[in-house]
Amino acid sequence: MTDFTMEKGADGVAIITWDCPGKSMNVMSIDGLSELDACITDALADEAVKGIVITSGKEGSFAGGMDLNLLAVMKEQAGDDPARGLFEGTMQMHGLLRKIERAGMDAKTNKGGKPIAAALPGTAAGIGLELPLATHRIFVADNPKARIGLPEIMVGIFPGAGGTTRLVRKLGAMGASPFLLEGKMVEPKKAKAAGLIDEVVEDPLAAAKAWVLNATDADILKPWDAKGYKMPGGAPYHPAGFMTFVGANAMVNANSKGAYPAPKALLSAVYEGALVPFDTALKIEARWFTHVLMNPSSGAMIRSLFLNKEALEKGAVRPKDVPDQRVKKLGVLGAGMMGAGIALVSAQAGMEVVLIDRDQAAADKGKAYSEAYLDKGIARKKVTPEKKEAMLNLITATPDLDKLAGCDLIIEAVFEDPGVKAEITQKVEKIIPADCIFASNTSTLPITGLAKAFHKPDNFIGIHFFSPVEKMLLVEIIKGKETGDVAVAKALDYVRQIRKTPIVVNDARFFYCNRCIIPYINEGARMITEGVKPVLIDHAAEQLGFPVGPIQLTDETSIDLGAKIARATKAAMGNAYPESPSDDLIFFMEEQGRLGRKSKAGFFDYDEKGKRTGYWHGLHDRFPLAEQQPDLIEVQERLMFSQVLEAVRALEEGVLEDIREGDVGAILAWGFAPWSGGPFSWLDIIGAEYAAERCDQLEAAYGERFKCPPLLREMAEKGETFYERFSPEAKAA
């Protein structure tokens, strides 16, 4: 069983086929690299071989990138010097791809090489594109579903197998930047227009063979190996190139706020590499690639945003013995923004949807949300009129509850009031089949309490969407005390159908995500009451890698929502409710009628079009600014610890059952500093000992909310990390 096989044809063309056994898409492994090297060496040495075509045995794809476990193996095999192991392993990849690129040609004359082409049936990502870039011509099937690009930056690294150096020399720094710095993936025709690939054809293998048999020495010589090569758009000290590099640096810092190591390392590799010959540039790329891999941030990002995320999407926490529970007919109760969004993503997945509201006008308004969304897609040429019609036909908007007959899943998305939810639950259960699963899209109300209104609490579950539903990638599934495995499997299979990432948590007030988000928002509010500048609070969060600071986030989610949650929580907890200055601020803003973006007045002032014009200075009449502003790091650590300590408590109390869900959920739900890999990964980076010590300092300065959880204290004393103790591998051992 091998990843690469070679067949030499009578026409003199050697076909190397990449086909990883048992995988739906090819990924590069250590064994794969050795096998490819052996095939290339053999073909170049065989006088009967006139040229080579590298292709894939997978229908619709070439390769999905590197087996990221390969990086871990490189580190391990290097023993006490992992950096050396990573650098040498990376240079071995460079050596192989350079062997393909030079193809046996004479070093002085650049003649005598064998043409090598890539024939891609479809998607090529990461090293799946870096390998073709080392060949002499890239042919791609006319497959509009295929995506071509280098997405490495999205998981905290950058293209390190020559993709960075080759793409910049091929397209120039400006042309390469969307693919390198943004991880942009495009369909084949757009890839050709951008210069990533050479040809889009019906039969890439046939076209590649024909080209190989007719290619000349000039056809296979890369521009950067020819005399007089000049980088498109100019090198760093060229007048035009200089401005490009200055602009790129400014753009990266504006977008990343300096929180992410990979973009800065990528820019350094590009800048330094552009000043030296190609082979030296590859060494520079390998050194910066190693630098990034040695940063704990990259490992944490790869683990959370790739490995853990993928595992959860493939059903890592799904009950094993429950048969397929994919949804055929879905009932959505409530056609407001959440219900309308749920109906949209479900119809997109091909489900029949019954969208219920109090009257026909309200139900139609909910369906109109999908129509408006699809119209925007048509305007952008992403959706056809036929697809629009087919999707809308899947949604039945009605006030008639009898239309719910035959549904196998109900999602309730009505007003966040236990009485209202209980009333609609009892009405609906008389109509739906006995084995139908009933889910509540509540964001705060305990599922066990809501399940009391349902005749079969084992078939009752929470499915918590985030707004806007069509954009947010995470869905939080909540198990009540009596929720059964079938309900859990149903929820997970449904979330997989709509192509979102699920986490499963046990029932508790605010569940997991809101449990951590609320302290983040509250800590920002507390600081305002202490006289800290709102701009300092928000910018401190943004420099940590959060998409928005807590003050802006409050305006976006609406201030009166915060007030409602505070009142409801206080009513439910009674004397146990912890009084907080943050409530005073929220209630004050509510009294002022400043409810956030929706009212064009909140912590920010807004113009008539709803654009922020600056922070509201009237706030300081009630809460004056302190003469002495706190240190940036102090603000950042208050914001970080307010969240991560709740995550630890959630794990400690059994709300979280799988540590992976805690990290992935935090990043996808509220944008928790992606560079960190999530709350638990961040604690592993800084170390439990330091975290416990800092807790004690913060508690002494600001109060009991920063008290070190017993679990964290225990781990500090034992010198443990969260992933050593709680990873699935550790549990299995």
Image (cartoon, rainbow, N blue to C red):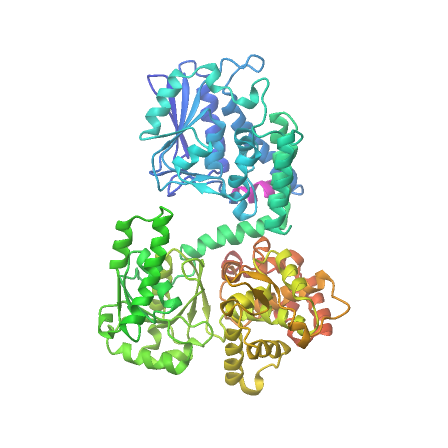
Can the viewer see residue 1?
no
In the image, residue 71 lies in the stretch drawn in magenta: yes
In the picture, residue 191 is in which quadrant? top left
Closer to the camera, 106 or 37? 106
- Horizontal arrangement in the rendering, residue 487 relative to residue 264 (left or right): left
Name the spot of residue 498 as percent of width and height, x first: 36, 57
Residue 63 on image: x %, y %: 42, 38
| Residue displayed at 43% across by 16% down | 46
Q: Is residue 246 magenta?
A: no
Q: Residue furthest right?
A: 628
Of residues 225 and 53, the one nearer the viewer is 225
Q: In the rendered view, tell whether residue 346 sits above or below residue 44.
A: below
Q: Quadrant of residue 353?
A: bottom left
Q: Picture coordinates of residue 490 (x, y %)? A: 34, 64
Q: Nearer the viewer, residue 201 or 381?
A: 381
User: Where is 2 relative to 543, above or below?
Assistant: above
Is 388 positioned to the left or the right of 577 in the image? left
Res. 453 in view? yes
Query: Is residue 691 shown left or right of residue 126?
Result: right
Q: What type of secondary structure mainly makes up the magenta span?
A: helix
Residue 155: percent from left, percent from top = 53, 48
Locate the N terminus by quadrant: top left
588 is higher (above) or lower (below) than 267: below
Tell me the magenta residue range: 70-77
Among the 4 quarters of the image, the one containing residue 199? top left
Q: Residue at x 77, y 68 (%)?
A: 628
